C-alpha cells in the first residue's frame, strides 16, 4: 500500500500483477477501503472480476467499453474502475486506453500474466501505467499469520513450517493443516498450468510442458541452458527443439510461476546471455507437487532469499567472477549488496568457499553470507546472518 498510495487518484493506470491467488484482489479491496476512508462514496466504484461467470458477456473490448460508458452516464464526479483478471477480456488494452482518454476516471487492473505489460499494455499505454508485482508472503508476514493459528510457536519452529508451506495467503484460512494445504497448493499449481500457461499459449504438447516445469522446479537455483535441457530430454528418448523449450520456460515466467535471474560478469560488468537461473514463485508449491524441500534445503533457502530480494524491490542478478559464483548481486538505485546462501557453515572448507568468493571484489558495498547457523561467524568485514 505504501508503494501504491502515491499513485492513487492520478491518471496513471495502476497495474497489479503476480501469480494466481497471491492476493491481487485483496489489494484492490484495500485500495477501495483507503478511498472510502478518504471520503470517496463507494457508489463511484465500478468493480468487475472477469473470472466471475456473471461478467462473461463483457469478455470483449467493445462490450466492456459500452457497459462502462453506460454505467458512467450522468456521473458528475470522478469514477474509480477496478478490473480483476483483465487478461480474460479480448483486446482489453484498447478499451482501457479509450476509457482513460474519454472519461474522468481512476483505473486499477490486475492480471496473472507478465505479458500484460511487456507486450499488450506497453503498445497502447506507453508510459501511462505503473506496475506493482504482488508476491506470496514473506517469512515475517507468514509468521504474523501463523501465530494467529499457533500462538505458542517459536520463530525457528515457524521457519520450519514456512520451509514446507511457503507463503500463499489462503493457507491461513485452512490453518496450515498439512493435507488440506498440500491439496490447495496442488490445485493452485494445476490451475496456473492449465489456465495461465496451456490455455493462454495454446500449448498442444502438454506432456513436454509438464516435463519442463518439473525439471525447472526440481533444479531451482541451478544454472542451466535450453541446450542442457534438450540434452536431458534426449537422454529420456525425447527429441525437442531448444526454441520450444525456451518458449515453454518463457510462458511459465509470464504466468509468474518462475522468476528468471540473469548472470552478471562482475569484472566486465556485463550481463551474460547463457545459463540463467530460475526460482519458483512459492516454494510451498514445490513441496506440495514435487516434494523434497528438506532434502534440497540449500536450493530452498536460496529460493527464499531470492524471492525476498525481489519483494524488497531489488534488481537481482547472479554474479560470476572468474570460475566462482556469487549467489545474488542486488541493485537498488545507488545501493548494491552481495549475498551468498548456504545451509550450514559446517566445515572450514564450506566457510572458506562461501567467504573467499568475495576476495576478488574490491568495492565497499555490503557483503553477506546467509545460513541456518545460530552463531555469528562474520569475518574480514563480511557479515554473516541467520536466514530468519
Image: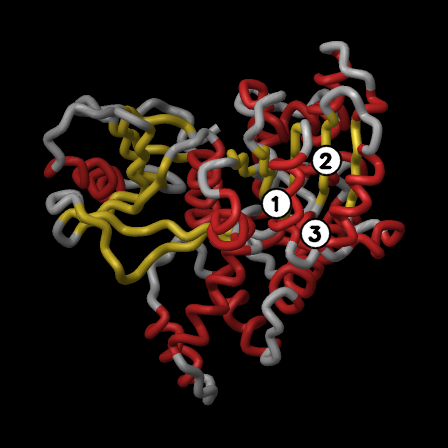
Mark toward the start of the polypeptide (3 vs 1): 1
Element type at mark 3: helix
Q: Position of residue 303 (x, y in %)?
A: 46, 45
Q: Position of residue 304 (x, y in %)?
A: 48, 40
Mark toward the start of the polypeptide (1 vs 2): 2
Q: Tell me if 262 is positioned left or right of 357 in this view.
A: right
Instruction: Rate crowding at label 1 as few (under 14), some (14 to 19) or many (20 or more) other CA atoms within 10 Å.
Output: many
Q: Which residue is the site of mark 2?
A: 82
Q: Which mark is residue 185?
A: 3
Q: Residue at (27%, 29%) from the top-left corner?
A: 336
Q: Tell me if 149 is positioned left or right of 232 in this view.
A: right
Rendered-image quadrant of the N terminus:
top right
Res 2 quadrant in image: top right
Res 67 quadrant in image: top right
Q: Position of residue 30 (x, y in %)?
A: 71, 24
Element type at mark 1: helix
Q: Residue at (36%, 33%) from the top-left corner?
A: 370
Q: Tell me if 279 is positioned left or right of 73 in this view.
A: left
Against 382, residue 54 (above or below) is below
Q: Which residue is the site of mark 1?
A: 164
Amino acid at each position: 500500500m505504501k508503494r501504491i498510495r502515491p499513485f492513487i487518484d492520478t491518471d496513471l493506470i495502476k497495474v497489479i500483477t503476480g501469480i494466481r491467488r497471491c492476493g491481487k484482489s485483496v489489494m484492490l479491496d484495500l485500495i477501495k477501503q483507503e478511498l472510502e476512508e478518504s471520503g470517496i462514496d463507494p457508489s463511484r466504484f465500478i468493480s468487475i472480476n472477469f473470472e466471475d461467470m456473471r461478467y462473461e458477456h463483457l469478455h470483449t473490448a467493445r462490450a466492456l467499453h459500452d457497459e462502462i460508458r453506460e454505467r458512467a452516464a450522468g456521473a458528475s464526479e470522478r469514477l474509480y474502475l477496478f478490473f480483476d483478471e483483465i487478461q480474460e477480456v479480448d483486446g482489453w488494452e484498447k478499451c482501457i486506453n479509450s476509457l482513460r482518454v474519454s472519461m474522468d476516471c481512476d483505473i486499477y487492473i490486475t492480471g496473472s500474466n507478465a505479458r500484460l505489460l511487456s507486450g499488450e499494455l506497453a503498445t497502447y499505454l506507453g508510459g501511462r501505467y505503473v506496475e506493482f508485482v504482488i508476491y506470496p508472503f514473506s517469512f515475517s508476514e507468514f509468521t504474523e499469520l501463523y501465530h494467529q493459528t499457533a500462538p505458542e510457536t517459536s520463530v525457528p519452529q515457524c521457519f520450519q513450517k514456512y520451509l514446507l508451506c511457503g507463503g500463499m495467503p489462503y493457507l491461513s484460512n485452512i490453518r496450515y493443516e498439512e493435507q488440506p494445504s498440500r491439496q490447495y497448493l496442488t490445485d493452485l499449481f494445476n490451475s496456473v498450468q492449465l489456465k495461465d500457461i496451456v490455455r493462454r499459449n495454446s500449448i498442444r504438447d502438454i506432456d513436454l510442458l509438464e516435463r519442463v516445469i518439473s525439471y525447472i522446479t526440481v533444479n531451482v537455483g541451478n544454472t542451466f541452458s535450453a541446450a542442457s535441457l534438450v540434452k536431458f530430454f534426449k537422454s529420456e528418448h525425447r527429441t525437442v527443439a531448444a526454441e520450444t523449450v525456451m518458449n515453454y520456460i518463457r510462458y511459465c515466467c509470464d504466468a509468474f510461476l518462475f522468476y528468471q535471474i540473469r548472470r552478471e560478469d562482475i569484472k566486465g560488468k556485463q550481463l551474460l546471455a547463457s545459463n540463467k537461473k530460475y526460482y519458483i514463485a512459492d516454494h510451498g508449491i514445490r513441496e506440495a507437487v514435487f516434494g523434497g524441500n528438506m532434502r534440497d534445503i540449500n536450493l530452498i533457502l536460496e529460493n527464499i532469499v531470492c524471492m525476498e530480494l525481489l519483494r524488497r524491490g531489488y534488481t537481482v542478478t547472479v554474479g560470476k567472477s572468474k570460475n566462482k559464483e556469487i549467489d545474488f548481486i542486488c541493485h537498488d538505485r545507488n545501493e548494491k549488496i552481495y549475498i551468498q546462501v548456504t545451509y550450514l557453515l559446517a566445515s572450514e572448507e564450506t566457510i572458506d568457499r562461501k567467504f573467499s568468493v568475495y576476495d576478488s571484489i574490491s568495492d565497499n558495498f555490503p557483503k553477506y553470507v546467509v545460513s541456518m547457523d545460530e552463531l555469528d561467524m562474520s569475518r574480514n568485514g563480511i557479515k554473516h546472518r541467520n536466514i530468519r
